[in-house]
Image (cartoon, rainbow, N blue to C red):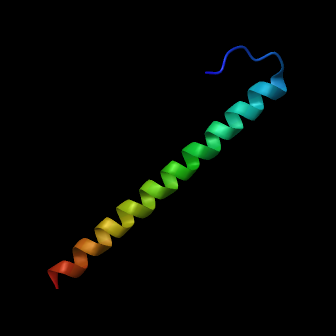
Amino acid sequence: MHGMYYTLQDFLTHTEGVTYLLILVALAGIAGFWFYLNGRDEDDH
């Protein structure tokens, strides 16, 4: 945490940024897992 938030706008801006970062990490993880599962199926054939 960066310290004290003096206004609600500061707090909401910070949490919005953190939320966007978490969404990007989750999407990258889902895409990576999807490619892992699909790559595994192609090797068996």
Q: Considering only vertical position in the picture, is 1 above or below 27? A: above
Q: Position of residue 26 (x, y in %)?
A: 49, 50
Is residue 30 left or right of 22 when viewed as pictured?
left
Residue 25 to residue 12: above or below? below
- Residue 13, above or below 11: below
What residue lies at 84% left-to-right and 20% top-to-bottom? Answer: 7
Q: Which residue is at 43% across, 54% downward?
A: 29
Q: Residue furthest front?
A: 2
Q: Is residue 1 left or right of residue 29?
A: right
Relative to 8, is 19 on the left or the right?
A: left
Q: Residue at x 68, y 33 (%)?
A: 15
- Residue 44 quadrant: bottom left
For the point 75% across and 25% down, which residue is it? Answer: 11
On the image, the x and y values in percent for residue 33 come to 36, 60
* Most distant residue in the bottom direction: 45
Check the picture and name the quadrant holding the C terminus: bottom left
Quadrant in which residue 36 is drawn = bottom left
Left or right, residue 32 beside residue 45: right
- Vertical placement of 22 versus 4: above or below? below
